[in-house]
Amino acid sequence: MDMIISALLIWFYMTTWYVVSLLQKRNDIADVAWGLGFIVVAFYSLITHQTSKLIISFLLIFIWGMRLAIHIYQRNKNKKEDKRYQQFKDNPYIKVFMIQGFLMWLISWPVINSTGSFKWFNLLGIFIWIIGFYFESQADKELRLFLKNKKNKGKIMQSGLWALSRHPNYFGEVSMWWGIWIVNLHSNWWTIVGPLTITYLILKVSGVPMLEKKYAGNQEFEEYKKRVSVFIPWWPKK
């Protein structure tokens, strides 16, 4: 029953944001809706079951979702619509909002289907989430400051966490969802669909591949690729 109600909740939530996108005349507002949507789902799960696991999960997802939504809003404010979304002008309701809603539902499975009381091994999930949150938030901050400096226009970010991974923010994102899965892990091992979905999306679909393609052929980026790990942070090659 929780699976059905959460799916309907997400449908209503994303449909509301679709209406907002029509008023704003830009589909990339879906990026702001993304993080906030997980907060809505986690809150629903919390008020219907009220377990210690869900209290922890809601707090972690709230911190992540609010930070991400604010970050994306500030990044996109007063800018033209993200080019990635311009290809979906013909049917954005399905191609943007409903597809993102379905993926949100899949990724939320560990929270929607959380079972059992909190055990010692669930603490590992909190630890992994903290590492992931640090990587995502710190990498976003480093990149924002780098791009803010006009001297860096046209250059590739290669310092800080970006010296250890070409996509440290995405590494952080994936790590956090594996952490959420472990926090809620009991006999519901099949909810691994959640972290597997976000991992696949970032590594094979909309995350790493798109940015790697964007900078392909850039001489500075090609040199950067030779030295720095694509995803998992590691010491750069000399």
Image (spheres, rainbow, N blue to C red):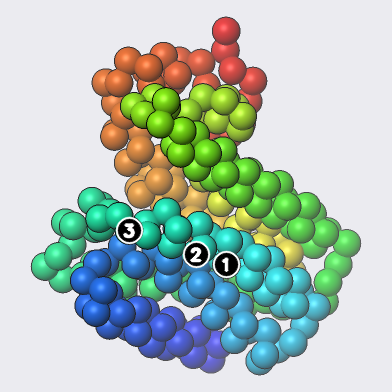
Q: Residue at 42% across / 25% down in the picture?
A: 151
Give the mark, 3 or 2, whose residue is nearer the N terminus: 2
Q: Residue at 52% across / 39% down in the picture?
A: 145
Give the mark, 1 or 3, whose residue is nearer the N terminus: 1
Q: Is residue 192 visible?
A: no
Residue type at mark 1? Met
**Residue at numbered disc 2:** 69
Disc 1 versus disc 3: nearer the observer: 3
Residue 191 on image: x %, y %? 58, 67
Whether residue 165 is situated above or below residue 112 in the rendered picture? above
**Residue at numbered disc 1:** 66
Q: Residue furthest top?
A: 238
Query: Does residue 48 appear left or right of residue 21 in this picture?
Result: right
Q: Secondary structure at mark 3?
A: loop
Residue type at mark 3? Asn
Are the residues flagged by discs 3 and 2 in contact, CB closer than 8 Å? no
Label 1: how many Cα within 10 Å (few below 14, some 14–19, many 20+):
some
Q: Residue at 70% across / 54% down in the picture?
A: 129
**Residue at numbered disc 3:** 78
Query: Does residue 213 appear left or right of residue 162 in this picture?
Result: left
Residue 126 on image: x %, y %? 76, 58
Q: Is residue 180 visible?
A: yes
